Image (cartoon, helix red, strand yellow):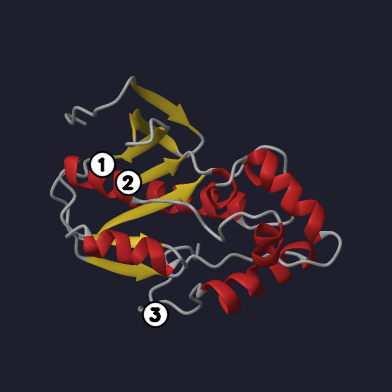
Amino acid sequence: MGLELSGGATATVPTRFGEVRMSTFHCEQGREHVCLVFGDVERQPNLLVRIHSACATGELFGSLKCDCGQQLEQAMTAMEREGQGVLIYMNQEGRGIGLANKLRAYDLQSRGADTVDANRLLGLPDDTRSYQSAVDELTRLGVHSVRLLTNNPLKLAAVREGGIPCHRVSHLVEVGPAASAYLETKQRRMGHLEKSESAQNLLAG
């Protein structure tokens, strides 16, 4: 691929979604994050990009309370299909509160609180995540413009404020009843978006 990536380690890794160039990088808080590069991305216009926050419960253990695992898989599938893309995997479990607090919030949710109120009952912010280091990594990779797979307006704003022209592609996935209230709360109380700015559906077969 010819692109030298920064970070503590870099390797070409065969995956179910094709061969990717995988690298670690660190943010100002010292957290280690991961960047996956599909194909040749430098200076490619309107590159498909996903900035994805870690979710051990959904991605590793098959929790049905969220859509994170499905979103990760669909993003990688779309990038494999296009032969190009960047997936930035951020070490920001539970909207930044960590796994232990996430489980504490889950326990409160099982007793009737929604995802926002559960955090507040624990004395925690609604969302502590930062996307600045992800934007910096995209800039370092030579990414000039992106189609961002997201429903989160904060990610969209971070990329645009970082000086990278950005068009949103909706990243809605089908979920079961265990996650439907969670997604509805994110839309109603956290401003998550539904319809894409474009009719284009990259995640269709």
Q: Nearer the viewer, mark 3 or mark 2?
A: 2
Q: Nearer the viewer, mark 1 or mark 3?
A: 1
Residue type at mark 2: give it. Answer: Ala
Q: Nearer the viewer, residue 22 or 140?
A: 140
Asked if residue 134 is positioned above or below residue 205 in the image, the reply reads above
Asked if residue 36 is positioned above or below residue 104 in the image, the reply reads above
Q: Nearer the viewer, residue 180 or 200?
A: 180
Asked if residue 192 is positioned above or below residue 155 in the image, the reply reads below
Mark 1, other Cα within 10 Å: few <14 / some 14–19 / many ≥20: some
Label 1 residue SS: helix
Q: Label 1 to label 3, Cα distance in Å?
A: 28 Å
Identify the disc placed on residue 56: none
Identify the disc placed on residue 134: 2
Image quadrant assignment for residue 87: top left
Residue 62: horizontal and vertical position, in percent?
72, 44
Residue 70: horizontal and vertical position, in percent?
60, 53
The quadrant of the rendering that contains the N terminus is top left
- Asked if marks 3 and 2 touch (Cβ < 8 Å), the reply is no
Q: Which residue is mark 3?
A: 199
**Residue at (58, 75) in percent of width and height:** 189
Is residue 84 in view from this perspective?
no
Residue type at mark 3: give it. Answer: Ala
Q: Label 3 to label 2, Cα distance in Å?
A: 26 Å
Label 3 residue SS: loop
Identify the disc placed on residue 137: 1
Q: How many marks?
A: 3
Image quadrant assignment for residue 41: top left
**Residue at (63, 42) in percent of width and height:** 59
**Residue at (39, 51) in percent of width and height:** 130
- Asked if marks 2 and 1 touch (Cβ < 8 Å), the reply is yes
